[in-house]
Image (cartoon, helix red, strand yellow):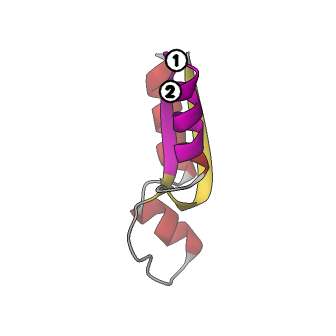
Amino acid sequence: EFVITLEDNVQFGGFGSMVCSKMNEWNLNTKVKTFAYRDEFIQQGNIASLQREYGVDSVEIENYIKSVLA
């Protein structure tokens, strides 16, 4: 089993962090993959370019899902 979270936010304190916290609290042995921006100052720019740079674009997400299902 695995859970994938996607957010347009930094990882620390975000939705994915909360999911991980609950999984631990409930003692669930479920792998969680969080797609979020790194915890750092995010430069201004084209959204598609930023998503690609931070690994949260559709290509990265699709590649991860394919690797998990393979």
Residue at x 57%, y 72% (from the top left corner): 47
The region drawn magenta spans 17-35
Q: Nearer the viewer, residue 25 or 56?
A: 25
> Could you tell me residue 19's position as x and y percent?
59, 37
24 or 33, nearer to the observer: 24
**Residue found at x 48% / y 15%:** 29
Residue 5 position (above or below residue 8) = above
Inter-mark Cα distance, 2 to 1: 5 Å
Q: Amino acid at mark 1?
A: Asn
Query: What secondary structure is found at the residue carrying circle 1?
Result: loop
- Are the residues tagged 2 and 1 within 8 Å (C-beta)? yes
Question: Residue furthest toward the front?
Answer: 25
User: What residue lies at 55% left-to-right and 78% top-to-bottom?
Assistant: 46
Is 9 part of what is drawn in magenta? no
Q: How many marks?
A: 2
**34 above or below 1?**
below
- Residue at the limit of the structure toward the bottom, as seen here: 44
- Screen quadrant of the N terminus: top right
> What number is the disc on residue 51?
none
Please tell me the numbered disc located at residue 24: 2
Q: Specify the amino acid type for callout 2.
A: Asn
The residue at the point 55 percent across, 68 percent down is: 48
Q: Secondary structure at mark 2?
A: helix
Query: Dot 2: few (<14), some (14–19), or many (≥20) neighbours within 10 Å?
Result: few
Q: Depth check: give the residue in front, 47 or 36.
A: 36
Disc sitting over residue 27 in the figure = 1
Q: Give the percent coordinates (x, y) of residue 36.
A: 51, 54
Q: Does the segment drawn in magenta span residue 34? A: yes
Q: Position of residue 43 (x, y in %)?
A: 44, 81
Residue 23: image quadrant is: top right
